[in-house]
Image (spheres, rainbow, N blue to C red):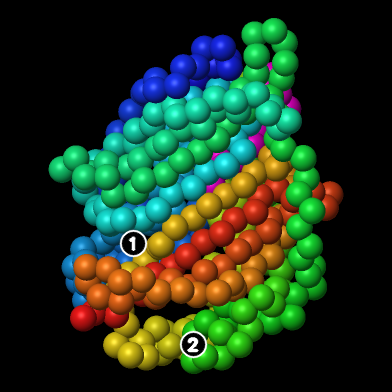
Amino acid sequence: MAEQRHFEDVEVGMELTPIPKPVTTRKLVKYSGSSRDFNEIHYDQESTAKTMWGNVIVQGMLKAGCIGHIATDFMGPGGYIHKLGCTYRAPDFVNQTFTVHGRVVSKDETADGLLVSCDAWVENPEGQTTTPGQFTVALPSKDGRKAAYPGQPPIPHDRAGTIKGERLRLGDPEVWKSHIGEWWTPWVSQVEQPWITAFADAIGDPNPIYREADYASTTGHGGIVSPPTFVEAMDADWRVFELAFEEELRQARSQPRPGGGGGGGDGFCDFNFYADIHPGDTMSGYTRWTEPYEKTGRAGKLVFTTRESVIENQHGQIVSTAKRATVSVYPK
């Protein structure tokens, strides 16, 4: 159980307590179920043997969730996370232990509260930083000032949606590119405590605020809440795994990418947070594609497919906004 940290306790340059994360196939399967990311590359050795990695790889968002773990441990039960993001530079693999590190880089008194920003990163057993990231939290003060989320952002989004984007992305890339900027039909999810607890277990975070009602009710959050990156499970992009025509999905995945692209995975993620998710909440996820872009990497051309999401609760409050990218590798 993390102790409460106050703004006055923090010094720029202070190191956060590292958190080791052993990764087993069971952990990856648990994360797939709780996050709704059922890509076989994260648990099926036969499928991954055919990829450029040749091994089961850790979900990028599981690593982001572990950065969320070090952030919430750092801020304590009276803190509020405002931002979290990371970039994926190299994969991590099953049956290894990676470690999450953090360091304070700034502290500021702002209109949104007493904010502390930290660098955070995932380091593999060889000491390589595979996933550099950062987060910002609001902390309470010893003089009685409390922390809170920032105010609700003025973000317009189409609550009806006009397309089923998860279906379009199975086909011709030129087709989905013609729908950039259009909001997809929303994905509505009913959240209950077992799902929240399963997600916290999957990222290896024992914080009682995710599972013990009596403890959680004594915090400023007023009850059980979800871990920060739980919002990713609301992203309508994962609805692709619930398509009724599974055979069509299988055939679409088996087709070679135009231009010979293959491999790849997560590119980056950036989240902003504005409210808690509690058991009993009904969440609506709104997603749309944004402009793709290209870079040149060591393995060849990298094509980034980008999207943004808005997650809203039943009260019309925006809980989170996010920007994500997946990357495809086109070998030299």
The numbered mark, 1 or 2, whose residue comes first in the sequence reads 1
Q: Which residue position is annotated with label 1?
A: 42
> Image quarter for residue 133?
top left
Look at label 2 and name its amino acid.
Pro
Q: Is residue 312 left or right of residue 28?
A: right
Q: Which residue position is annotated with label 2?
A: 173
Can you tell which of label 1 and label 2 is closer to the viewer?
2
Magenta-drawn stretch contains 223 = yes
The kind of secondary structure element at disc 1 is helix
Mark 1: give few (<14), some (14-19) or many (20+) Cα within 10 Å: many
Q: Is residue 318 above or below residue 225?
A: below
Q: Is residue 20 left or right of residue 13?
A: left
Residue at mark 1 to residue at mark 2: CA–CA distance: 24 Å
Which range of residues does the magenta coloring cover?
A: 217-229
Magenta-drawn stretch contains 300 = no
Asked if residue 4 can be seen in this view, the reply is: no
Residue shown at 32% from the left, 42% from the top = 122
Q: Is residue 134 above or below residue 178?
A: above
Assign the magenta stretch its main secondary structure: loop
Look at label 1 and name its amino acid.
His
